[in-house]
Image (cartoon, rainbow, N blue to C red):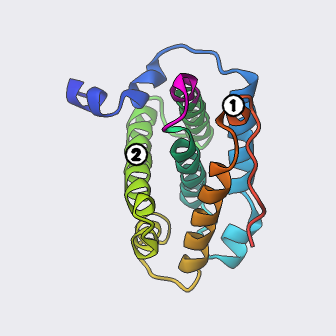
Amino acid sequence: MTDTDAERNPMIMSLFRKKTATEPVYAVYSSIVAQSRRPVFYAQWGVPDTVTGRFDMISLHMALLFRRLRNGPAGSREFSQAVFDLFFKDMDRSLREMGVSDLGVPKKIQKMGNIFFGLLAAMNEAMDRNDADALAGVLARNVFDGQDTPELRALADYVFARDAELATQPVEAITAGSIQFEAAA
């Protein structure tokens, strides 16, 4: 990773710093993972039930969390960073369990980080404009291999609804470990 990469993706560099995640961080991350594993995404909305599809769904919910915390009080950024760190420690562990070599893990983690940041930036841009078509395009590229599926609009509607729902939850409650996701359709 070059210095320029580190400057653009400071959260990736934090993977190499030693930090202890707190209970609220684990609680929020666990809620994100649980929501991302809901069968509706895979059985009804056509998200591929693969390692990549599951990563995409966790990334999508992480992006929603980051959107909620991006303009919060000072501690919000540190909390986001801690959840991000835990996410990628979990991805590191998963890759190793799948048999990826010690030399291959950092390259895969960097690629996953770039995918996540690309998704986050594209989602923010589309959602800040309240552009459902643009969000559908982002989801098509990132979740459905570029295909415009009938289920794509259901997922886009879900993302907008969860974003609005998270906007009503106090940042202080989230950083204390309580994040609520309504059930998917």
Dot 1, how many residues are within 10 Å of its Cα: few (below 14), some (14-19), or many (20+)?
some
Residue 72 in magenta? yes
User: Residue 96, position in %: x, y?
Assistant: 57, 35
Q: Quadrant of residue 85?
A: top right
Q: Secondary structure at mark 1?
A: helix
Task: Please tell me whether mark 2 sits on a helix, a strand or a loop.
Answer: helix
Taking depth in this image into account, of 60 and 115 the one nearest to the observer is 60
- Image position of 49 (left or right of 30): left
Q: Which residues are magenta?
A: 71-79
As drawn, 140 above or below 78: below
Q: Is residue 172 above or below residue 138?
A: above
Q: Is residue 153 above or below residue 73?
A: below
The residue positioned 27% from the left and 27% from the top of the image is 7
| Quadrant where the C terminus is found in the figure | bottom right
Q: Nearer the viewer, mark 2 or mark 1?
A: 1
Q: Is residue 56 left or right of residue 142?
A: right
Q: In x, y percent, where is residue 71?
A: 49, 37
Question: In terms of secondary structure, what is the magenta stretch mainly?
Answer: helix
- The residue drawn where x is 70% and y is 45% is 169
Label 2 belongs to which residue? 117
Q: Which residue is mark 1?
A: 172
Q: Amino acid at mark 2?
A: Phe
Decide if residue 172 is on the left or right side of residue 11. right
Task: Return the x and y of residue 120 as percentages of the image width and height.
Answer: 44, 50
What is the three-letter code of the residue carrying label 1?
Answer: Glu
At a point 61% along the width and 40% down the height, the residue shown is 94
